[in-house]
Amino acid sequence: MIRLKNSDEIDGIRKSCHLLADMFNYLLPQVKAGMSTKDVDDLCKNFIVSHGGKPAWYRENFAGAACISINEEVIHGVPSRKRIIKNGDLVSIDVGIDLNGYISDSTHSVLVGNVKPEVRKLDQVALECLAAGIEACRVGNRISDIANAVYEIADRHGYGVVYDYCGHGVGLDVHEDPSVPNCPFRGANPRIKPGMVLAIEPMINLGVPDVYTLDDGWTVVTDDGLCSAHEEHTVAVFPDHTEILTDLNYKK
């Protein structure tokens, strides 16, 4: 069931999203080679807790405040003292905040040091896919319009679009209906309505679209071992516009 949010609920979700944007503005300049993914996770957790929130992934029994995925890791990378960020890495950081029961969700990828041109281009295209998906997220369109907008850009560049995982409704829980795929799909295809709050999150692979999960039960990696880029925003749909709630440059 799709939960359309009222103005008070959207205001609560917006506050959570703005806190998440503040966290990323604090965090991203600090991510450097030599840090462990647990170091990054500690920065996220300490910021969230010190500002009155809770890591939303704790609701999912995930062992961290952030999913930190490097290179061939697509999503759900588990923070570890042993996983060290290196020069040339693409590091995707996926964080959600539970602020007074309202959930935010966003992902930003950091290009660390001397990143290969093909990896830099991959992340730039993932950002273009995200922008196109958000542009297609407007009243009267359908979820398939978001999926097709993302897929068309990635496919034009010859990239693989992950089909096993997708975006979703969010705001009152971590994962809500509807699912928001990034490629053409069959099945439920609801029309976009005011009150929807969605996490739009392209996951774009340098090679094949296929993925599998490691033995830790969480970390999803590309089937061919090539790099993946993941970018994500939470958006709210209004009758005459769509607001990017997790915009790093939101007006305070």
Image: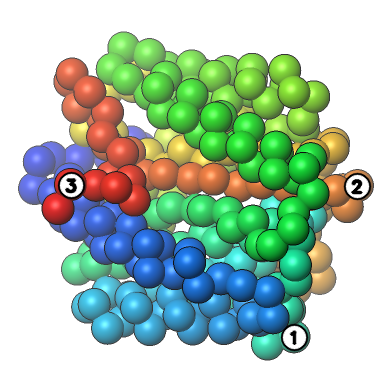
Q: Position of residue 207 (x, y in %)?
A: 84, 37
Please, what secondary structure does the residue beneath circle 3 have? loop
Query: How far is mark 1 from mark 3, CA to CA?
Result: 38 Å
Q: Residue at x 19, y 27 (%)?
A: 238
Write down the quadrant of residue 83 in the picture: bottom right
- CB within 8 Å, label 1 to label 2: no
Q: Give the crowd class for mark 2: few <14, some 14-19, many >=20 residues within 10 Å.
A: some
Query: Tag 3: residue type?
Result: Lys
Residue topped by disc 1: 82
Left or right of 8, for residue 107: right
Residue topped by disc 3: 251
Pick the residue in front: 68 or 101.
68
Please, what secondary structure does the residue beneath circle 1 have? loop
Badge nearest the viewer, 3 or 2: 3
Pick the residue in front: 114 or 6.
114
Q: Which mark is residue 25?
A: none
Query: Tag 2: residue type?
Result: Asp
Query: How far is mark 1 from mark 2, CA to CA?
Result: 23 Å
Query: Tag 1: residue type?
Result: Lys
Q: Give the crowd class for mark 1: few <14, some 14-19, many >=20 residues within 10 Å.
A: few
Pick the residue in front: 145 or 122.
122
Q: Residue at x 13, y 40 (%)?
A: 6
Pick the residue in front: 34 or 174.
34
Residue topped by disc 2: 224
Badge nearest the viewer, 1 or 3: 3
